[in-house]
Image (cartoon, rainbow, N blue to C red):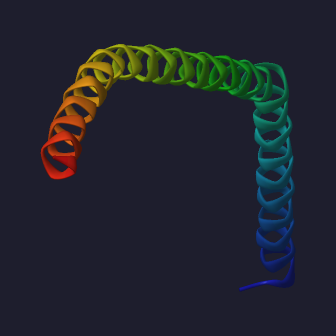
Amino acid sequence: MSSDKIKDVQHAGEVAADTAREELEAVKAHIERLVTQHIVPALGRAGGKAGDLTEQAVANARELADHTRNDLAKRTGNRSSWLSIAISGVVGFIIGRLSR
């Protein structure tokens, strides 16, 4: 090969490398714009929604716990009062029998 052809091939290689580098930079800039304009705001909104859902879930759990506690108190409150009266009656009967 002559030196002119070698120089032409080298020059063509350099031009191709420069073109590829410029295209890669353009793609990189485009991806950065997409991330900045679309993905970051979407992630921010998703984080906000997740926070809202977490707060709502905690509020629902507290409400459920309150209802359960109140329901349990109502159920055991009635039984415990009748149970207390029955135990007092039995104890009173036994003490009365023993004191004769």
Relative to 17, does residue 64 appear above or below in the rendering? above
Q: Residue drawn at (28%, 33%), measured in percent from left and top?
A: 88
Q: Position of residue 17 (x, y in %)?
A: 80, 61
Answer with left or right where residue 68 lies relative to residue 90.
Answer: right
Q: Residue drawn at (85%, 46%), measured in percent from left and top?
A: 25
Q: Where is residue 10 in the image (x, y as percent from the top left)?
A: 82, 73
* 44 or 79: nearer the viewer: 79
Relative to 56, does residue 7 appear above or below in the rendering? below
Q: Residue drawn at (44%, 15%), measured in percent from left and top?
A: 70
Q: Quadrant of residue 53?
A: top right
* 66 or 5: nearer the viewer: 66
The quarter of the picture where the N terminus appears is bottom right
Answer with left or right where residue 12 lies relative to residue 64.
Answer: right
Relative to 18, does residue 30 appear above or below in the rendering? above
Q: Residue drawn at (16%, 36%), measured in percent from left and top?
A: 93
Q: Where is residue 50 in the image (x, y as percent from the top left)?
A: 63, 25
Relative to 82, does residue 96 appear above or below in the rendering? below
Answer with left or right where residue 87 lies relative to residue 23.
Answer: left
Q: Position of residue 74 (x, y in %)?
A: 36, 13
Q: How many marks?
A: 0
* 55 or 4: nearer the viewer: 55
